[in-house]
Image (tube, rainbow, N blue to C red):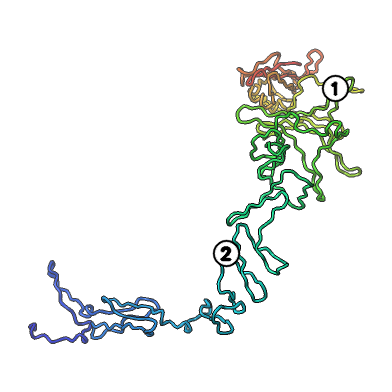
């Protein structure tokens, strides 16, 4: 191994990847090498589209930087102070003629057509005035000549003056029922109208009541009121108003809300209140709904709706209550309207038609309609009552219960092949299925035994709900037997009567 003093000299520029430094790890004693070229610096410019600050690197470790100087020293200075390069703009050295002036239009010059000295005249864009008094405004007195008018008093305005040919200073003059108040920088014009001296014609304009009334005396809050929502109130009592839920509200404590006519002052034999006819071709007429008030929160009762004809006096008769359905045009295939009676269920969700009068005179009473007292059928000839009868129900030749649905048909038939014991449905099913709404409601049905052997009997029981069904009478329906000495028709007639919300009594009535 060569001695250290005899090593050859390695120039910086000659160092390459084969030249290394030997290093030793003092902990492990391991010897490693480090490339000598890694100790020399390198530089690069990382900015995009920018000028580098350096020129190059020479002699492996010498970085050569560019200098900074002003290309136009009259507009920009570059100096070094406290090891900082300071750049300063010199406004005095900027030549605006060298700048792009196409958008901002600065410095394009003013063309006065001539060199102006002294006061700039009107023809060159000036006023031609050497001085302007405080409060003066410019007025074109004549062609190319300005003058000034001074407005020194409150309320003064420039008003056109055909005599002078240019505006002059004046104040507004108040006319009838108008007051004018002039203040510093303000003119107040107010109406002082206390009473009309002629008809008021608004032309095509509206009247803004501004949350006030058309009242009988101008001071009391009563009369006709138009709310900001556009709804109209007729209010004789001055009650505080809130947003209405209808286009027209009649308020106050008078029991008579609307009277048509005014006795001898204005009266005719009949009046019509109607919806206006739709002028559009083929459009349906509007429906007219009259409704009583609903109860408020709690257990309040809804308001009744009463139609009451006028009372007669002396030997005169009271007025008739007439209900007409709408007519149809003569000679058309349409049908006249029908008078319908409805009962409304909970919350108005279920509306049930109770009765109907058709335009041919037929009167219908529908399901669930109640006749509280005797229904009399009278006519010059024998009256008839026809009821609907659907197909009979059939219960099986077994022990299946006679269901509420079977009973509801009115006729239940069975063809037993031996003696059969059959229970009734539960009382609750019968009550709901047959619609026995109130205690005392009843329903009649027949059970027909179609067996002809004279021995296959049907016995009805309450074994399915004995605690709520009470049986009264013979509950055995015999088989048909036409023998003279043992005749049985094979039919039983029964009546179901509701005795409570959960119990019934069933009678054998024939």
The residue under the point 53% across, 78% down is 105
Q: Is residue 217 left or right of residue 266?
A: left
Measured as percent of width and height from the top left, residue 156 is found at 63, 59
- The circle drawn on residue 338 is none
Looking at the picture, does residue 19 appear above or below residue 492? below
Secondary structure beneath label 1? loop
Distance in Å between CA atoms under marks 2 and 1: 102 Å
Measured as percent of width and height from the top left, residue 213 is found at 69, 40
Quadrant into which the N terminus falls: bottom left
Q: Residues within 10 Å of mark 1 (few under 14, many from 20)?
A: few
The residue pinned by badge 2 equals: 135
The residue under the point 64% across, 27% down is 300
The residue pinned by badge 1 equals: 377
Q: Nearer the viewer, residue 444 or 294?
A: 294
Looking at the picture, does residue 205 appear above or below residue 384? below
Looking at the picture, does residue 35 appear above or below residue 189? below
Q: Residues within 10 Å of mark 2 (few under 14, many from 20)?
A: few
Measured as percent of width and height from the top left, residue 59 is found at 23, 86
Q: Quadrant of residue 457?
A: top right
Q: Sequence order check: which comes first, mark 2 or mark 1?
A: 2
Is the Cβ of the residue at disc 2 closer than 8 Å to that at disc 1?
Answer: no
Q: Quadrant of residue 218?
A: top right
The residue under the point 13% across, 87% down is 8
Res 398 visible: no
């Amino acid at each position: 191994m060569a001695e250290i003093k005899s090593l050859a000299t390695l120039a910086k520029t000659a160092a390459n990847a084969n030249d290394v430094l030997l290093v030793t790890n003092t902990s492990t004693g391991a010897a490693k090498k480090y490339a000598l070229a890694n100790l020399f610096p390198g530089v690069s410019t990382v900015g995009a589209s920018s000028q580098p600050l350096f020129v190059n690197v020479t002699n492996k470790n010498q970085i050569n930087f560019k200098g900074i100087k002003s290309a136009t020293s009259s507009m920009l200075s570059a100096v070094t102070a406290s090891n900082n390069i300071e750049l300063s703009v010199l406004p005095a050295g900027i030549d605006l003629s060298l700048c792009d002036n196409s958008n901002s239009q600065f410095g394009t010059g003013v063309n006065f057509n001539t060199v102006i000295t002294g006061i700039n005249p009107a023809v060159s864009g000036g006023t031609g005035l050497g001085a302007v008094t405080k409060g003066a405004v410019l007025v074109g007195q004549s062609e190319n000549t300005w003058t000034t008018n001074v407005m020194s008093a409150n309320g003064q305005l420039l008003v056109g003056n055909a005599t002078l040919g240019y505006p002059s200073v004046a104040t507004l003059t108040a006319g009838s029922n108008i007051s004018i108040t002039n203040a510093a920088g303000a003119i107040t014009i107010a109406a002082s109208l206390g009473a009309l001296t002629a008809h008021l014609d608004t032309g095509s304009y509206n009247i803004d009541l501004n949350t006030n009334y058309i009242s009988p005396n101008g001071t009391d809050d009563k009369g006709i009121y138009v709310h900001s929502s556009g709804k109209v109130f007729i209010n004789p009592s001055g009650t505080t108003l809130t947003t209405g839920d209808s286009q027209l509200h009649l308020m106050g404590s008078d029991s008579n809300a609307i009277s048509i006519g005014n006795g001898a002052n204005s009266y005719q034999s009949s009046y019509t209140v109607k919806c206006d006819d739709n002028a559009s071709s083929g459009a349906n007429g509007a429906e007219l709904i009259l409704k009583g008030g609903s109860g408020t929160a709690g257990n309040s009762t809804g308001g009744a709706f009463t139609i009451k004809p006028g009372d007669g006096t002396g030997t005169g008769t009271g007025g008739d209550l007439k209900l007409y359905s709408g007519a149809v045009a003569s000679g058309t295939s349409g049908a006249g309207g029908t008078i319908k009676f409805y009962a409304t269920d909970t919350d108005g969700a279920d509306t049930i038609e109770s009765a109907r009068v058709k335009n041919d005179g037929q009167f219908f009473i529908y399901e669930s309609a109640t006749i509280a007292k005797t229904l009399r059928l009278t006519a010059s000839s024998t009256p008839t009552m026809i009821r609907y009868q659907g197909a009979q129900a059939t219960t099986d030749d077994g022990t299946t219960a006679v269901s509420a649905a079977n009973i509801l048909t009115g006729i239940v038939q069975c063809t037993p092949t031996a003696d059969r014991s059959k229970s009734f449905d539960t009382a609750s099913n019968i009550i709901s299925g047959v619609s026995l709404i109130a205690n005392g409601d009843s329903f009649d049905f027949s059970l027909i035994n179609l067996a002809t052997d004279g021995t296959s009997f049907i016995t009805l029981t309450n074994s399915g709900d004995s605690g709520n069904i009470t049986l009264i009478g013979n509950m055995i329906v015999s088989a048909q037997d036409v023998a003279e000495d043992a005749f049985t028709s094979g039919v039983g007639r029964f009546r179901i009567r509701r005795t409570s919300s959960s119990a019934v009594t069933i009678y054998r009535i024939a």
